[in-house]
């Protein structure tokens, strides 16, 4: 019992000594910008989730005029694709691959590029059963929402890694 306690204590000490900290645990903004403009429609699901996460990340303010922003996110391309992955012995589709692709860049108010055009591609595989079409459509929607959340987190990590001029 003492060995376990000593092991747990030593692990905690090592983690704190190396600077380990949970993401967002410092209470400060993770984004290096005070103001940001998001060039995504406000009513799009991606735009809604990105804005919500930026507001929750700290003291970064989302502005409606790009001239007032320290950083401007421009979406160059966003697409969802569905490709056949496998077929069964009768030639019917058995599995699909779902792709969610986003190409974006980040500029400052003076049109200087802070982040060159970057493409993020996410992929999920989904099985298909023709006797459960509605359930599979709902599963597909859920997977796209999951990929969108993952995409927003990846964008935020890229933004947090940028240096302001």
Image (cartoon, helix red, strand yellow):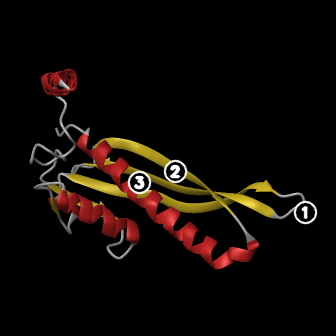
SS label for mark 1: loop
Q: CA distance from mark 3 to mark 2?
A: 8 Å
- Count of numbered labels shown in the rendering: 3
Image quarter hosting the C terminus: top left
Q: Earlier in the sequence, mark 3 or mark 2?
A: 2
Image quarter hosting the N terminus: top left
SS label for mark 2: strand
Asked if residue 81 lies left or right of residue 109, the reply is right
Question: Residue 122 shows which numbered tag?
Answer: 2
SS label for mark 3: helix
Asked if residue 147 lies left or right of residue 64, the reply is right
Please give the name of the residue rendered at 84% of the width and 58% of the height, measured from the top-left corner.
88
Q: Earlier in the sequence, mark 1 or mark 2?
A: 1
Please give the name of the residue rendered at 30% of the width and 44% of the height, measured from the top-left corner.
157
Tell which of 165 and 123 is nearer to you: 123
Question: Residue 90 shows which numbered tag?
Answer: 1
Res 45 → quadrant: bottom left
What x and y, as percent, mark residue 81?
A: 61, 61
Q: CA distance from mark 1 to mark 2?
A: 30 Å
Question: Residue 151 shows which numbered tag?
Answer: 3
Pointers 3 and 2 in contact (C-beta within 8 Å): yes
Res 129 → quadrant: bottom right
Q: CA distance from mark 3 to mark 1?
A: 36 Å
Q: Earlier in the sequence, mark 3 or mark 1?
A: 1
Tell which of 127 and 145 is nearer to you: 127
The crowd level at tag 3 (other Cα within 10 Å; few <14, some 14-19, many 20+) is many
What x and y, as percent, mark residue 49?
A: 32, 65
Please give the name of the residue rendered at 39% of the width and 59% of the height, measured from the top-left corner.
149
Question: Residue 162 shows which numbered tag?
Answer: none
């Amino acid at each position: 019992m003492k060995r376990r306690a000593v092991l747990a204590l030593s692990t905690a000490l090592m983690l704190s000594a190396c600077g380990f900290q949970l993401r967002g645990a410092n209470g400060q903004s993770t984004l290096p910008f005070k103001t940001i403009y998001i060039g995504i429609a406000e009513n799009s699901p991606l735009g809604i989730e990105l804005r919500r996460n930026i507001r929750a990340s700290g003291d970064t303010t989302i502005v409606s005029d790009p001239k007032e922003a320290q950083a401007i996110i421009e979406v160059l391309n966003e697409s969802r694709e569905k490709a056949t992955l496998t077929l069964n012995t009768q030639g019917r589709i058995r599995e699909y691959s779902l792709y969610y692709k986003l190409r974006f860049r980040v500029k400052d108010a003076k049109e200087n590029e802070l982040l060159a055009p970057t493409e993020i591609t996410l992929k999920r595989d989904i099985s298909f059963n023709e006797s459960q079409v509605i359930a599979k459509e709902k599963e597909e929607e859920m997977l796209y929402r999951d990929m969108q959340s993952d995409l927003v987190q990846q964008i935020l990590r890229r933004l947090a890694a940028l240096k302001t001029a």
